[in-house]
């Protein structure tokens, strides 16, 4: 079992399989050039699997594949199936911008994927295109429907930005509610790669807008990053508020990047690389790095407007 020094059990790994993306979201990587990653720098699926097998044996129960845009990496379904075949009870999930789901959802489900979180920041074609810097809305909405049709568990993620999409909170909420899909509104996390003019909308403002139309109660907090709320008719939605005091108390996750960096906390710049150990077949060393990362997991993140993180979301996978 992996337990950190604040007595949190780490049983969840987010794996970024690529830092490439076909979107250029204003809050994430608005100015990053479209480049190929040199193949030798990134872990192969077999190398990632070697490491993840170790983590599963140490007690990891949930793996979320993310990126960049994970569906840009070839044969993702084969990687998912490697993990599924090793442990069919694993909670196997994917975070995606949804653009390629119309093509891939069926294959992914067949490979063993259980759930998918899809980013949806606007229901207006022009606004979605402004945020992603690409005309994306039609494909993303089709991606959501295809994932649902295939029987995947679906949640939606919306980063709320002042003056850009904060006037759509109710529209997005009702779109999700009509499909009986949980939507989570995410507070924008300041970082130095984001478009400089972006301003976050605090969780209390988001909740206030929803409360003008709907009555809800807060559900007891579990160890997910979200706080969940329930309407009187049973519909559930969430808020992700990394700036709040208790966000880190129940954190159960670490992150692996495509280049082999193991990251104990999204905010902190420290990381440890497992690539060399895995490539040399030194499993004992890889296991030691895993335990060290868990041991050194900081108690709290520190998302502040005046102390902007240099962490790139598209490398860590959010
Ligand atoms: N490309 C996929 C997607 O967009 O869902 C997966 C990678 S993306 C980096 C993972 C998550 O990070 C997404 O839900 C995205 O909205 C979120 N994210 C990226 N930059 C963010 C920021 N500055 N603040 C809050 N959330 C952010
Ligand atoms: Fe790409 Fe996801 Fe970042 Fe948007 S949030 S640029 S879709 S990695």
Image: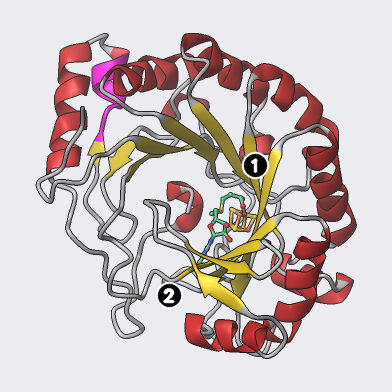
Q: Mark 2: is the Cβ under 8 angstroms from ligand 1?
A: yes
Residues shaded magenta: 273-278
- Please tell me the numbered disc located at residue 250: none
Q: Mark 2 and 1 residues: CB-CB less than 8 Å, in contact?
A: no
Magenta stretch: dominant SS?
Answer: helix
Q: Which residue is drawn at 48% across and 20% down?
A: 44
Q: Which residue is drawn at 72% across and 35% down?
A: 152
In the depicted view, which residue is nearer to us: 255 or 213?
A: 213
Disc 2: which residue: 190
Name the spot of residue 187 as percent of width and height, x first. 50, 74
The residue lying toward the viewer, choosing from 182 and 257, is 182
Q: Mark 1 points at which residue?
A: 116
Answer left or right for 145 relative to 242: right
Count of residue discs? 2
Judge from the rendering whether residue 107 lies leftward or rightward of residue 271; answer left or right.
Answer: right
Q: Quadrant of residue 209?
A: bottom right
* Dot 2: element: loop
Mark 2 and mark 1: Cα distance apart in space: 25 Å
Which of pointers 2 and 1 lies earlier in the amino acid sequence? Answer: 1
Bin the neighbour count of mark 1 within 10 Å (Cα to Cα): few under 14, some 14-19, many 20 and up: many
Q: Position of residue 291 (x, y in %)?
A: 16, 31
Q: Can residue 134 be seen in this view?
A: no
The stretch drawn in magenta includes residue 277: yes
Residue at point 68% right, 62% down? 235
The N terminus, quarter of image: top left
Secondary structure under tag 1 reads strand
């Amino acid at each position: 079992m992996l337990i950190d020094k604040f007595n949190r059990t780490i049983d969840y790994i987010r794996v970024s399989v690529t830092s490439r993306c076909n979107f250029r979201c204003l809050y994430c990587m608005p100015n990053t050039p479209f480049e190929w990653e040199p193949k030798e720098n990134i872990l192969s699926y077999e190398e990632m699997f070697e490491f993840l097998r170790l983590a599963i044996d140490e007690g990891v129960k949930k793996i979320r594949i993310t990126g960049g845009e994970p569906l840009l990496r070839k044969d993702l379904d084969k990687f998912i199936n490697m993990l599924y075949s090793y442990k069919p009870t694993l909670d196997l999930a994917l975070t995606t911008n949804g653009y390629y789901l119309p093509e891939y959802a069926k294959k992914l489900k067949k490979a063993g994927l259980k759930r998918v979180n899809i980013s949806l920041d606007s229901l207006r074609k022009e606004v979605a295109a402004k945020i992603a810097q690409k005309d994306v809305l039609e494909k993303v909405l089709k991606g959501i429907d295809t994932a649902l049709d295939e029987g995947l568990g679906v949640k939606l993620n919306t980063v709320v930005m002042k003056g850009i999409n904060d006037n759509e909170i109710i529209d997005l909420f009702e779109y999700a509610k009509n499909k009986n899909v949980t939507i989570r509104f995410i507070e924008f996390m300041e970082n130095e790669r984001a478009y400089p003019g972006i301003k976050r909308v605090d969780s209390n403002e988001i909740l206030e807008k929803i409360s003008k139309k709907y009555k809800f109660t807060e559900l007891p907090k579990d160890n997910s990053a979200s706080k969940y709320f329930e309407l009187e008719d049973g519909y559930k939605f969430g808020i992700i508020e990394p700036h709040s005091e208790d966000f880190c108390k129940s954190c159960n996750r670490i992150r692996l990047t495509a280049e082999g960096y193991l990251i104990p906390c999204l905010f902190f710049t420290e990381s440890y690389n497992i690539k060399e150990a895995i490539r040399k077949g030194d499993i004992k060393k890889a296991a030691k790095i895993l335990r060290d990362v868990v041991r050194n997991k900081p108690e709290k993140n520190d998302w502040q407007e005046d102390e902007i993180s240099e962490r790139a979301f598209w490398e860590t996978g959010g």
